[in-house]
Structures are given as structure tokens and as C-alpha cells.
């Protein structure tokens, strides 16, 4: 967060709020400003435009590390579905790929 904020010349709070607003399903953000300076830092986020590379960095560092069976499900689930079906944007391999 701090590295991206430094690149853009804004506060970490502004980057954090800009990133949160860009997340799918987020329709509003809550700010926790208790002073005018904090309020200004939060409102500055409205002018922050994150590049695709910066978004990828922030998404990568914020991805939760899940316990078993999450990793197992991620790697095995596509092989257990009906061939060619797409679920959550991932297509199960076709029969031709399974037999190869």
C-alpha cells in the first residue's frame, strides 16, 4: 500500500479507499476520519486512479491465504466438473484433454 501511495504521491489511506471502491460488489465505502486531515486524506482518494499494474499488486498482497480444502478445491475442481462446462469463469477440460 505504502509503495503504491509513494508512486502516486498520495496517502496510503487514499490508495486503500481507491482500491476498495474498485472491488466488485462494493457500492459504498466507510471512512473513519476523526480529524480534518484524515477527512482530507480520505476524500483525496476520489482523485486516485490506480493503474492495472498497481491494482494487480494490491490484489496480490491482499489475497487471503486459505486453509485446506481451498487450495485443493482450486486445483481439483475443474477436473471434477462436466467436460467443457464453465463455472466461476473457469472451464473444465474437454474429454479430449482428459484422455491425452
Image: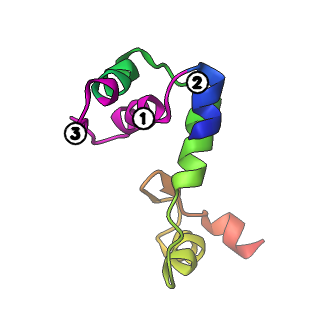
When asked about the image quadrant of residue 45, the answer is: top left
First in sequence, mark 3 or 2: give its number.
3
Helix, strand or loop status at disc 2: loop
Q: Which residues are magenta?
A: 10-38
**Number of other residues with Cα within 10 Å of mark 2, as a class: few under 14, some 14 to 19, many 20 or more:** few
64 in relation to 18, above or below: below
Left or right of 47? Residue 2 is right
Left or right of 51? Residue 12 is left
Q: How far is disc 2 from disc 1 in space, using C-alphas? A: 17 Å
Which scheme is used to colour this image of the protein? rainbow
* Residue, disc 1: 13
When asked about the image quadrant of residue 42, the answer is: top left
Which residue appears at 55% of the width and 35% of the height? 55
Q: How far is disc 3 from disc 1 in space, using C-alphas? A: 12 Å
* Residue, disc 2: 51
Residue 30's disc number: 3
Helix, strand or loop status at disc 1: helix
Amino acid at each position: 500500500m505504502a509503495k503504491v501511495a509513494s508512486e502516486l504521491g498520495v496517502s496510503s489511506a487514499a490508495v486503500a479507499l481507491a482500491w476498495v471502491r474498485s472491488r466488485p460488489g462494493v457500492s459504498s465505502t466507510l471512512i473513519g476520519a476523526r480529524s480534518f486531515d484524515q477527512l482530507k486524506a480520505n476524500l483525496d482518494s476520489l482523485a486516485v486512479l490506480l493503474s492495472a499494474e498497481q491494482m494487480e499488486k494490491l490484489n496480490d498482497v491482499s489475497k487471503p491465504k486459505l486453509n485446506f480444502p481451498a487450495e485443493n478445491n482450486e486445483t481439483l475442481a475443474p477436473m471434477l466438473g462436466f467436460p467443457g462446462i464453465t463455472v466461476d469463469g473457469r472451464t473444465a477440460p474437454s474429454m479430449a484433454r482428459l484422455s491425452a
